[in-house]
């Protein structure tokens, strides 16, 4: 056993290490720089994708509200402009808070606005403020304004004169304006 140890120590001490068997400092720095460049390109793309995903929630809600406004007009012959009007055809669930974190974590954060006479509320996620805006007796705009500066909004319109509806996913950040349909 002792001879085996001596042979192993002798072998290891005589073995020559090649200088090419490790990375140099310059090679490591180049790899770190490349990783930094790639991440600086990828991170904004991921953030943009996250904002687009949030925008789909608002787009779905606005589309549902527009269809409910059409149904209300068909049945009653007048333009819907309050939550209670569209609440006859689609459930209007809102968050009490304007913060996505509060909407997810606080108990009883979600409220049924289907019987409310309000014309604005926060989306279920808390990411958007939904606003019903009537222009005369002929046009209803449904706006979903983001609660974050980097958020993307949605605008929808229903025109009783033509029966047309229009839904636009906005590609710029900030407050959403009423659209023509």
Image (cartoon, rainbow, N blue to C red):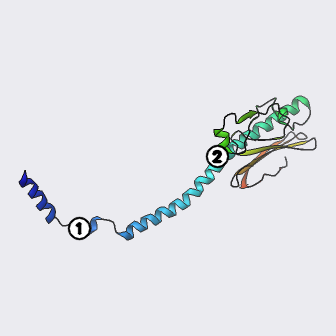
Return the x and y of residue 1 as percentages of the image width and height: 7, 50
**What is the spatial separation of the Cα atoms under label 1 and label 2, in whole angstroms?**
53 Å
**Could you say which is closer to the camera, residue 22 or residue 108?**
108
User: What number of labels is visible?
Assistant: 2
Residue found at the far left of this picture: 3
Judged from the image, the secondary structure of the residue bearing numbered disc 1 is loop
Q: In this rendering, is residue 27 above or below 67? A: below
**Could you say which is closer to the camera, residue 164 or residue 13?**
13
Return the x and y of residue 33 as percentages of the image width and height: 47, 66
Residue at screen point 70% across, 36% down? 109
Q: In this rendering, is residue 3 above or below 70? A: below
Return the x and y of residue 5 as percentages of the image width and height: 10, 55
Q: In this rendering, is residue 10 above or below 175? A: below
Residue found at the far front of this picture: 107
Badges 1 and 2: C-beta atoms under 8 Å apart? no
In the drawing, what numbered circle is on residue 18? Answer: 1
In the drawing, what numbered circle is on residue 125? Answer: none
Residue at screen point 90% across, 30% down? 76
- In the shown orientation, is residue 20 left or right of residue 126? left
Residue 156, by quadrant, is: top right
Return the x and y of residue 86 as percentages of the image width and height: 82, 33
Residue 111, by quadrant, is: top right
- Answer few, some or many: residues within 10 Å of disc 1's Cα (few below 14, many 20 plus, some between 14 and 19): few
Residue found at the far bottom of this picture: 26
Q: Could you tell which of marks 1 and 2 lies nearer the N-terminus?
A: 1
In the rendered image, which residue does mark 2 sit on? 53
- Answer few, some or many: residues within 10 Å of disc 2's Cα (few below 14, many 20 plus, some between 14 and 19): few
- In the shown orientation, is residue 129 left or right of residue 82? left
Residue at screen point 12% across, 57% down? 8
Judged from the image, the secondary structure of the residue bearing numbered disc 2 is helix
């Amino acid at each position: 056993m002792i001879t085996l140890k001596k042979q192993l120590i002798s072998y290891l001490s005589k073995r020559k290490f090649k200088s090419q068997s490790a990375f140099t400092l310059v090679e490591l720095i180049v790899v770190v720089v490349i990783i930094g460049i790639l991440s600086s390109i990828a991170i904004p793309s991921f953030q943009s994708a996250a904002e687009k995903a949030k925008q789909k929630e608002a787009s779905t809600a606005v589309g549902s509200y527009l269809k409910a406004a059409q149904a209300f007009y068909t049945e009653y012959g007048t333009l819907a402009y309050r939550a209670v009007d569209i609440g006859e055809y689609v459930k209007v669930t809102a968050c009490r808070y304007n913060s996505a974190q509060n909407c997810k974590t606080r108990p009883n954060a979600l409220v049924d606005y289907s019987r409310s006479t309000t014309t604005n509320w926060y989306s279920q996620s808390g990411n958007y403020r939904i606003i019903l805006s009537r222009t005369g007796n002929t046009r209803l705009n449904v706006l979903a304004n983001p609660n974050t500066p980097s958020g993307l909004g949605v605008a929808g319109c229903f025109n009783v004169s033509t029966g047309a509806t229009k839904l636009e996913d906005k590609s710029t950040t900030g407050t959403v304006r009423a659209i023509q349909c």
